[in-house]
Image: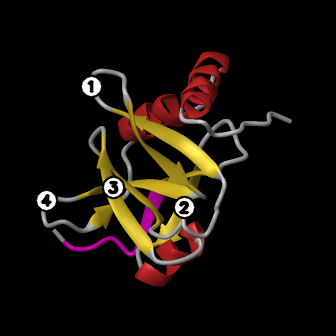
Amino acid sequence: MSKEDVIKVMVVAPNKARPTLLEIKNELNEMQKIVGGYIERVIYEGFDLFCNEEGKLEGLPLNRPLYDSDGKMVEIIAGQFFISAADSEGNQRSLTDEEIEKATNLFTFTHTSLHRFVNDLQAMGIQVELG
């Protein structure tokens, strides 16, 4: 399978309730532009999440929580990130329509999921102000 030149990804911004579909060049510098620095790949729920590897150190806004299979928060992504998928050779590829729907459902903040995230942050001693 050859590497796709342009791929469909979902971009998740910290100040937006829903991810946004975007087509990007399948190149490292394009990926770094989205996250605002060096990229780190996190595998979650069958997706490749690409975030700024120094997002927390740089004080980027907390964005989305990641939960384990028991519902315990195990990570928080700081700053803008994007969701992609890999082909059998490890190259990034476009998300399928089904993956776009799954990613949208997984990373859209609802009232309930936002409330849960805020409670988890407060339990960790992190001050949260909702605007």
Q: Which mark is residue 88?
A: 4
Identify the secondary structure beneath mark 2. loop
> Residue 114 sits in which quadrant?
top right
**Viewer-side residue, 96 vs 32:** 32
Q: Residues under labels 4 and 1: Cα distance?
A: 25 Å
- Crowding at mark 4 (Cα within 10 Å: few <14, some 14-19, many 20+): few
Q: Are marks 1 and 3 in contact (CB under 8 Å)?
A: no
For marks 2 and 3 on the same chain, the one whose residue lies earlier in the sequence: 3
- Mark sitting on residue 42: 3
The image quadrant of residue 27 is: bottom left
Eye-nearest disc, 2 or 1:
2
Q: Amino acid at mark 4?
A: Ser
- Point out the tag, 1 or 3, that comes first from the N-terminus: 3
Residue nearest the observer in this picture, 110 or 64: 64
Q: Earlier in the sequence, mark 4 or mark 1?
A: 1
Q: Residue at x 60, y 24 (%)?
A: 119
- What is the CA distance from the residue labelled 2 to the residue labelled 3? 15 Å
Residue drawn at point x = 49 percent, y = 56 percent: 82
Q: How is the image coloured?
A: secondary structure
Earlier in the chain: of badge 3 and badge 4, it is 3
On the image, the x and y values in percent for residue 67 come to 38, 32
Membership of 113 in magenta stretch: no
| Label 3 secondary element | strand
| Secondary structure under the numbered disc 1 in the rendered image | loop
Stretch in magenta: 2-8
Counting from the top left corner in percent of width and height, residue 80 is at 59, 58
Distance (Cα) linking label 4 and label 2:
31 Å
Measured Cα–Cα span from mark 1 to mark 3: 16 Å
CB contact under 8 Å: marks 4 and 2: no
Which residue bears the numbered disc 1? 69
- Say what amino acid the circle numbered 3 marks: Val
